[in-house]
Amino acid sequence: MPPLRDHLDACIERIYQAVDGTADWSSVLSTLGPPLGAFSAAMFTLGNDSSRHGEANMDTERMDSYIDHYCVQDLWWHGAERRRLANAGAVNTDAAFEPDTEKLLASEFYNDFLAPQDIRYLLSLSVAGRRTPEPSGTFLSLYRRHADEPFGPGEEAFLAALAPHFAAAFRLADRLAEVERSLDAATAGLDAATAGFIVLDRDLSIRCMNGTARDILAARPPALRAAGGRLAAPAGAARAQLDAALTRAGAAAWAGIMRAFPPFAVPRPPPERPLTVEVAACAPSCAAGGGTGAWHVLVTVIDPGRRPGPDPAAIAPALGLSPREAAVAASLGGGRTIVETAGSLGISEETARKYTKSIYQKTGLRNQAELVAAAWRVTR
């Protein structure tokens, strides 16, 4: 059997996996039980909003009945409250909660809930607890059978060593839930926008997106798609550009550097115009999280077919262009080709190309994707 130190490391790793979603609390309990000689375990919150978080080797219907009824009859829980043993981080046994064995064995809680499951001894960790406005607490409970020995000081010390990690994990989970709520609220407010906004975490996993982005990713055939929780493009130059931009933005976000990267075009089958994609590393106050959480990567996707074209009247002064150059810039910024721009403005293709060259020289922009981003930026 591996030494207890190895068990401790395995339990700590699994605790934080439960926060990042690669494990759940039931698997944490399954990992924790064997080194402590527990045949079953459960984690639940008691109080006004009683709920269960996970269990190992326990019947889920019985746990539901505990939350619905037997928690009110639980002498151990009431003993913890009465003796003020439910403070966060406290580790106790059944004898500390209810030292009167005869009272326990005569109770409804024991005879109708514990005994049918062959539960006799308890080792408990108060993961979180408070006394206002009403007593409540989140408990991790490990159980032994009637034929077993009671839990001893060694098991108590092992569980106490894990207490700070359980507390940190629950704080992290609460913080992540808060960030998720903020992101959801922020992107809900962007659903009316005609540009797509996709927020990624620093590891480049998709956190949330607005309605326009969802529509763009759902289009068939897809120019952009969500694959395994990450943003992807079809094979080709667009995929290479997207991967490179995301990698660089992720690195900047980890370093705490606010930076936008050059926009690029993602082609679509005709007659659809290309999407324009811009990637940036954003500080918490600038990302859609509204200031909560860590740095993010923000991906802006412009679909020229979803909105009226850029406004030449706004482009001319903002980019330092003549009215005619601004008209060409607006057309190109709307995703049209040189040929389409020439036809719509009633000029020759050669003239359109001359205007385009002048636009790039005056603005320092290098290609149409950058022009699209700039045209929409000043039109907003």
Image: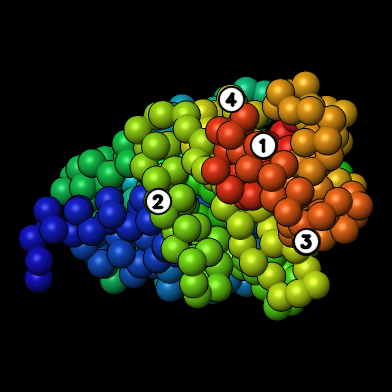
- The picture places residue 369, in percent across and down from the top left corner, at 62, 50
* Dot 3 crowding, Cα within 10 Å, few <14, some 14–19, many 20+: some
Q: Are marks 3 and 2 in contact (CB under 8 Å)?
A: no
The N terminus - image quarter: bottom left
Whichever of labels 1 and 4 marks the residue nearer the N terminus, that label is 4
Q: Is residue 158 visible?
A: yes
Nearer to me, 279 or 142: 279
Q: Nearer the viewer, mark 4 or mark 3?
A: 3
SS label for mark 3: helix
Residue under numbered circle 1? 359
SS label for mark 2: helix
Question: For the point 37% across and 60% down, which residue is it?
Answer: 28
The C terminus - image quarter: top right
- The picture places residue 5, in percent across and down from the top left corner, at 12, 53
Measure how far apart labels 1 and 3 are at the Cα level.
16 Å
Question: For the point 67% across and 37% down, which residue is it?
Answer: 359
Q: Nearer the viewer, mark 3 or mark 2?
A: 3
- The picture places residue 124, in percent across and down from the top left corner, at 38, 47
The image's mark for residue 247 is 2
Residue under numbered circle 3? 339
Question: For the point 84% across and 30% down, which residue is it?
Answer: 323
